[in-house]
Amino acid sequence: MKKLTGPFTQILPLTGLPIRGALKDEQLHIIANGGVLIEDGLILAVDDFEKLRTNYPSVQIEEITGDHVLLPGFVDCHTHLCFAGSRAKDYAMRNSGKSYLEIAASGGGIWDSVTQTRLATETELSNLLAKRIARHLAEGVTTIEIKSGYGLSATEELKQLKAIHQAANKTHAHIVPTCLAAHIKPKDFDGEGNEYLKYLLNDLLPKIKQQGLAKRVDVFIEQSAFNTSDALFYLSRAKQMGFEATVHADQFTTGGSEVAVKARAASADHLEASGDYEIKLLANSDTVAVTLPGASLGLGMGYAPARKLLDAGACLAIASDWNPGSAPMGDLLMQASVMAAAEKLSTIEVFAGLTYRAAQALKLNDRGILTKGKLADMQDYPCNDYREILYHQGKLKPARVWTAENND
Ligand code: NIG
Ligand code: FE
């Protein structure tokens, strides 16, 4: 059964744009009074609504009334949604000027979330996930990457990944799980960081592969987490096992993005500390540079050099990093809008970073633009001009959100 949805005041299909580098709003192709023809969750055509209605006279019509601007659904390529508990205490301490070490010494930090998440059952975690996924989906995020990383033992990481699968089966959003068992070395592991990574390679990754629980692994490269040589060894071995790689890189100190490029990782995420050397390296690689403005806002730090990365020719994606510690807000559009004002990003650079460029970070070629053959993942905003969307800095939310799973 074919369905024609529209008319939309404006459709921004985001087609025909380069995968990397700076973009100007003049490059934007806008279809006025457009419609989308859909069959079985896939797009058949995007064109003038009346033209499509004439050419396909017998299709079902989903009529849109009033002014609406249609965009591809957002792809959030970096989240840590699978957690229990709160770290409000950390946030308050940080805002009172307490240091990272003081917060950790008082029982806060990533380890606190590990403790709270280990206490939750798989079903409790999946219920918490379902609520967060539903909120993200209602806000236009149709593909959500979700990391484990608050389990930090083979059993607990498997529990997290299974909870992610449970939640994925109950939503129309597309869920992409990632194993972040290499988040920090757990306090209860008896051995060095490299030994913990070897334990993950021997005792966890084969099980994840066997049970089909994730196809991607992530590692946090930082002084408080894993060093560059251990991380490179881990990613190379994981890749040999068939996993795709991604890296928490250059958040406070550099080194991580270089490992990401050497390991031919799909993405290097954070990059707040990246300088000219790292920018050049990323721009000359196929590794997507993922900026996480939610972490900058949560920690009260500067943004990653998004403008410089785009001008150097990098593929720049924008993700929420939604997690209980550094990025508790989870409002991707608000974060992207606010960063755009500070970093001077054009509207189209922001939309590209939230859609087809973010899909590239997950190596997904079937979404992120509205054109024939792509997934019918889309969202419409109640306004008559696409510029209204960032102008409202995240307060203008989509009126409707469709994903391929319920769009036919
Ligand atoms: O991406 N940087 C490391 N990991 C997370 C924070 C996780 C946490 O604080 O719980 C991040 O910001
Ligand atoms: Fe993160």
Image (tube, rainbow, N blue to C red):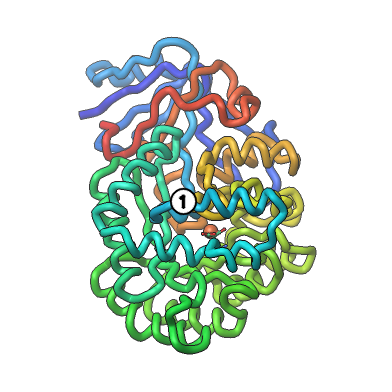
> Whole-percent x and y of residue 27?
66, 35
Is 171 located above or below residue 2 in the figure? Answer: below
Q: What residue lies at 34% left-to-right and 78% top-to-bottom? A: 204
- Viewer-proximal residue, 254 or 61? 254
- Count of numbered circles in the view: 1
Q: Residues within 10 Å of mark 1 (few under 14, many from 20)?
A: some
Three-letter code, disc 1: Ser
Q: Residue furthest top?
A: 66
Q: Which residue is mark 1?
A: 86
Q: What residue lies at 49% left-to-right and 67% top-to-bottom? A: 111
> Whole-percent x and y of residue 147?
42, 60
Q: Residue furthest left?
A: 1
Is 324 located above or below residue 171 in the figure? Answer: below
> Whole-percent x and y of residue 114?
43, 65
Q: Is residue 35 left or right of residue 224?
A: left
Can I make out residue 359 in this image?
no
Secondary element at image label 1: loop
Q: Quadrant of ligand 1?
A: bottom right
Q: What residue lies at 26% left-to-right and 31% top-to-bottom? A: 408
Q: Is residue 21 left or right of residue 381?
A: right
- Viewer-proximal residue, 171 or 387? 171
- Viewer-proximal residue, 2 or 329? 329
